[in-house]
């Protein structure tokens, strides 16, 4: 597997892996009809926006790594009580 693909499939690097997989699965099941999968695309877009804002905030605060690990993300989402996206 190429390094780029491996990085995209790594849950520590890609916080929206499940949303990405869901939108791809939807496209496959619906013959690549984008209209049918718009809710999945919106959920993925909101996920990316949310984690990007977390990343920016951590960079400004000097926290390394700027993207929280998968375990840290689970804690953040658990503290919020619900999915913010």
Image (tube, rainbow, N blue to C red):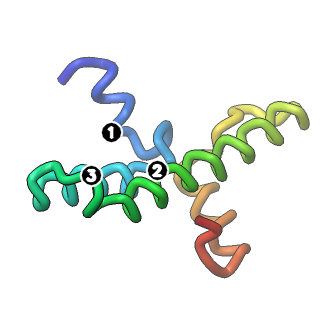
> Pointer 1: what residue?
9
Horizontally, residue 35 falls left or right of residue 52, namely left
Horizontally, residue 50 falls left or right of residue 60, namely left
Q: Residue at x 88, y 33 (%)?
A: 60
To which quarter of the image does residue 76 belong?
A: bottom right
User: Element under label 1?
Assistant: loop
Picture layout, residue 22 above or below residue 11: below
Mark 2 vs mark 3, foreground winner is 3
Q: Viewer-proximal residue, 4 or 62?
A: 4
> Pointer 3: what residue?
34
Please report contact status of discs 3 and 1: CB closer than 8 Å, yes or no: no
Q: Earlier in the sequence, mark 3 or mark 1?
A: 1
Q: Residue at x 47, y 57 (%)?
A: 42
Q: Residue at x 37, y 33 (%)?
A: 8
Horizontally, residue 6 falls left or right of residue 54, namely left
Q: Residue at x 12, y 53 (%)?
A: 28
Please report contact status of discs 2 and 3: CB closer than 8 Å, yes or no: no
Estimate the x, y position of residue 85 in percent, counting from the top left.
58, 65
Residue furthest front in the image? 35
Q: Earlier in the sequence, mark 2 or mark 3?
A: 2
Mark 2 vs mark 1, foreground winner is 2
Estimate the x, y position of residue 59 in percent, counting from the top left.
81, 32
Estimate the x, y position of residue 12 in percent, counting from the top left.
49, 42
Q: Which mark is residue 16?
A: 2
Q: Quadrant of the N terminus?
A: top left
Q: Viewer-proximal residue, 72 or 33?
A: 33
Q: Which mark is residue 68?
A: none
């Amino acid at each position: 597997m190429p390094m780029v693909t491996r990085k995209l499939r790594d849950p520590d690097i890609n916080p929206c892996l499940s949303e990405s997989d869901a939108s791809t699965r939807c496209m496959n099941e619906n013959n690549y009809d984008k209209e049918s999968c718009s809710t999945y695309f919106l959920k993925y877009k909101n996920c990316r926006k949310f984690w990007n804002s977390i990343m920016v905030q951590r960079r400004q605060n000097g926290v390394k790594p700027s993207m929280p690990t998968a375990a840290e993300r689970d804690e953040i989402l658990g503290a919020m009580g619900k999915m913010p996206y």
